[in-house]
Amino acid sequence: MLKQYSFEKTAVQTFPDNVSLAMRTENLQVFYGANHAMHDADLGFPKNQITALIGASGSGKSTYLRSLNRMNDNIATVTGKIWYHGVDINEPNVNIYEIRRHIGMVFQRPNPFAKSIRENIVYALKANGFKGKAELEERVETSLKGAALWDEVKDSLDKSALALSGGQQQRLCIARSIAMEPDVLLLDEPCSALDPISTVKVEETLLELQKKYSIIIVTHNMQQAARVSSQCAFFHLGHVMEYTPTATMFSNPQIPATQDYISGSFG
Amino acid sequence: MEQTNFQLKKQDAQSHDEWDARLHRATRATREDWMGRGISYLCIGVIILVVASMLWFITSKGIATFTQNHVSLWKFLSGTNWAPDQGQIGALPMIVGSFAVTFAAAIVATPFAVGTAIFMTEISPNKGRKLLQPVIELLVGIPSVVYGFIGLAVVVPFMRHLVGGSGFGIISATFVLFVMVLPTITTMTVDSLRAVPRHYKEASLALGATRWQTVSRVILRSATPGILTAVIFGMARAFGEALAVQMVIGNAAIMPKNLISPASTLTSQLTTGIGDTIDGTLPNNALWSLALILLLMSLFFNALVRFIAKRGQLKNGR
């Protein structure tokens, strides 16, 4: 049986002013029609760190993540503030296309386009008017290297991306996102469709990428959160219950709900 | 009662031969199986017979022009003089007429159809489903004689006013066919756009591409084989349409010099002439030869659709 945890008793950290944050949300609420899917999320994401969002299915973590680059537009109602470089990007008159260029996203299921590997990467660049054959080639190489895929595909850049394995496809999706040189990379359960070896490769890639990007990753896998993240937020039924440094969360959880979740009592 | 019966049976089958016989015996289940299979084989057999005999009939009649009346195939395909009573059977004017109206209708209709389909799937799916879908289904259901009648009553006089002449001709036929193939191409394009995986769209939007960039570079691109198939189906319909075309094209079996003078197509010539000929004579055989061309063209369109479907699969890498 699922215990009733009090949503009043939470332990959410805030960061002092000297920690620079990539983004921050304030009172973020998400509604699917009458369904209140996310309550009062106040989270800050430190720059160049990996923050993991953990919790059971339906806890609102993916919903929250998708709100951060406005992918919930036309799907859900999102209220509250999302601060990014001092701008509330949850305002309706903000250019969502520009936001998504700075805040990239990788989805649960690898979703490369039915184009060649090269075209998958240059697609967004071309769509944004990025020109020059040599420059495009260079971007293809640097992004594939960034996603640790270059050595595996450098001889077959013109092959269909759909011919790659699941793990390679997912790293291609990461490469495609970082080709735009975003600030923030959002990953929605990027490894849940992958086998353990591919998962390790993606995780290694992420650890390398945090030097350049701020990463927010939703994961079902607590071990994964422990392995890759520096900060960790625990979501439960649409509430953020606890947000602490990852080491603290897994060694010394602050509230009973977190304690039970990470020890496997539910979820 | 049931149980004792079962036990009895179980007892009386002891030797291997008895088991062998029992396990090979037909039961109600196997008889039902045979029946079902028999019925479906019968149906398919009848259909194959009908199709095969139609093919045989049209082909044998169609080649009679060349085998019995000794008209050369080349003269038939390249001759421009169609007067079967006088032994002149050059079918080129009708071939040109058919292709002209088909291509013109497809070229005019495709942009409208794709635009409508994009509106229905990407821009306003709700209005598309509630408003446009019924309208398009209605357009499909209107009998071709009604289209022809509207063409005759509205399009032909309009063309007469606009460009002079009689108003009958390829341009009027194109206009009528445009309206007739539009729903065919639109519905099939809608289907192929809806079949584009949702995650392509999501991926493109997440990369900061605009809705228009997403539609034009990702969605249309991966729906291209489907859209081509839709256009070919529309062309097949235009190529085969007889009645509506016959009512507006003017039915003059002469080489079309422009778009506004009376012309004719394979189908219109066939429907115009079929009542006036006697079975077994050259004029009759010549019409069968026109029918044979129509048949071969529809086979060609079918083959093209299959070819595109195959190429499309290869392109998607699976």
Image (cartoon, helix red, strand yellow):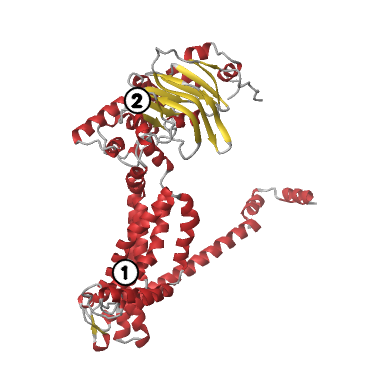
Q: Nearer the viewer, residue B315 or B102?
A: B102
Q: Residue at x 67, y 48 (%)?
A: B15
Q: Mark 1 = which residue?
A: B174
Which type of secondary structure does the marked residue at label 2 adopt? loop
Find the distance from the CA under tag 2 to the CA under tag 1. 55 Å
Quadrant location of residue B104?
bottom left
Position of A141 with respect to B142 (left or right) is left
| Quadrant where the C terminus of chain A is found in the figure | top right
Q: Nearer the viewer, residue A196 or A15?
A: A15
Position of B97 with respect to B144 (left or right) is left
How far across and down, in percent of the image, does residue B140 sit?
44, 65
Relative to A103, is B86 above or below? below
Q: Any mark on residue B221, and which?
A: none
Q: Nearer the viewer, residue A133 or B162?
A: B162
Q: Mark 2 = which residue?
A: A183
How far across and down, in percent of the image, does residue B180 sit?
39, 67
Circles 2 and 1: CB atoms closer than 8 Å:
no
Single out the residue that lies furthest toward the right: B1
| Quadrant where the N terminus of chain A is found in the figure | top right
Asked whether the residues under marks 2 and 1 belong to the same chain, the reply is: no
Does any portion of residue A239 appear in the rendered image? yes
